[in-house]
Image (spheres, grey):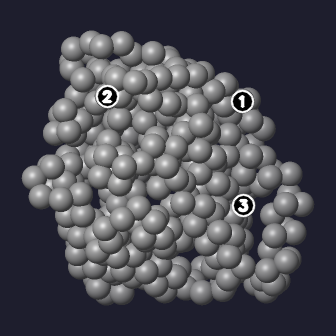
Amino acid sequence: MQKEKALLFVLAIVQFSHIVDFIIIMPLGSQLMEIFDITPRQFSFIVSIYAVSAFLSGLTGASFIDRFDRKHVLFVAFVGFTASTLLCSTVSSYVPFLIARGLTGAFGGILSAMVLAVIGDAIPLERRGWALGVVMTAFSVASVVGVPVAVYLAAAFSWKTPFLVIGILAGVIAVLVPFIFPSMRIHLENGPVDRRPLTVFKQIFRDSNQVNALLFSLILMLGHFTIIPFIAPYMQLNVGFSDKEVGYIYLVGGSLTVFFLPYFGKLADRIGHYTVFGISSAFALLSIFTITNLPQVSMVWALCATSSFFVVASGRNVPATTLVTSVVRPESRGSFMSVRASINEMALALSSLIAGLIITKNPDGSLTHYEIAGYFAIGMSLIAIWLGKRLKSVS
């Protein structure tokens, strides 16, 4: 158990760096739209290009990711991610920033796949929900610490400052990974496996269980991320949060999920992963409706709405991810998780683009049609509940 905890701690640190880099774009949305003089649709491209690059890198990684020690792949991907994040802090206009975000997404996609592959290989299914709950608290810690600090740095200095700080911190962690992360070769010791690229993809897409898992991941992401890129801008432009106050969304919501997320994992291990996924999804539907139809209210009520979404939406992702990791055996898990990461990123790009097409600005600067994006997310979430029931565990 002590070795498992140490492994999860390293993975959580990697996730923390990766997640802060990604979600900091959301609260910086209104600033970036003003500084670059871009529309909500153009802002959605900043989010989408990260996802599109991660999608492409995930598909490419699926052809080789299971051929190497997990440690080596993780290290190379993290170094590339660090360099790309630092690049984001050096550009000064819209198009170069898009290119830098695309590079960051390419390495981030491989990182996401590797974290799940390592957990799937190292942690038995009966404790995997707990393990994923622990690692996924990195999102919450990033929200509690990383995002508020990044928002403050952007407001006090420059929008470039958060990327510079994240890049420096990630660089320090990357140097330490070779010394503190164990070698992981169990997937190479389970007998001969045909790892030719075409064969890898055939094995995945001929397995109906794995196809269902990929479809489940895609639909769930559409039901989750369609509203996320515009939560912060909506709270600023429609509800009345200031640039600094928007950090409270992540501080309060993240603090609550830090506390609750491990319990979602433990509960899922105890009473069933699909059961907990279904219950938390039902509450997520209510939260999505509330946020996307929120009028001008006090900050307290607005934070109650956003925090409830943080908790139940993150909570349902723990058992959902556990279900997905269980549909494939260790010797093919890295390739499958890489394809799954690509599917997730494609869904992320689609959801961001869909939101960008739906949501527009009123003459007074406020956003309109956010509730339509919410109804779309609710519909996708309902389909995901149905699909989750069809998944079967093999490991």
Is 86 in front, or is 255? 86
Is 368 in front, or is 81? 368
Give the residue displayed 85% in from the left and 68% down from the top: 203
Is residue 8 rendered to the left or right of residue 70?
A: left
Question: Number of labelled discs?
Answer: 3
Q: Quadrant of the N terminus?
A: bottom left
Give the residue displayed 45% in from the left and 15% down from the top: 293
Secondary structure of the residue carrying tag 1 is helix
Residue 381, horizontal then vertical, whole percent: 63, 29
How far is disc 3 from disc 2 in space, using C-alphas?
44 Å
Say which mark, if any, is on residue 328: 3
Residue 312, horizontal then vertical, whole percent: 44, 30
| Residue receiving disc 1 | 383
How far is disc 1 from disc 3 in space, using C-alphas?
22 Å
Q: Residue furthest front?
A: 363
Tell me which amino acid carries mark 1.
Ile
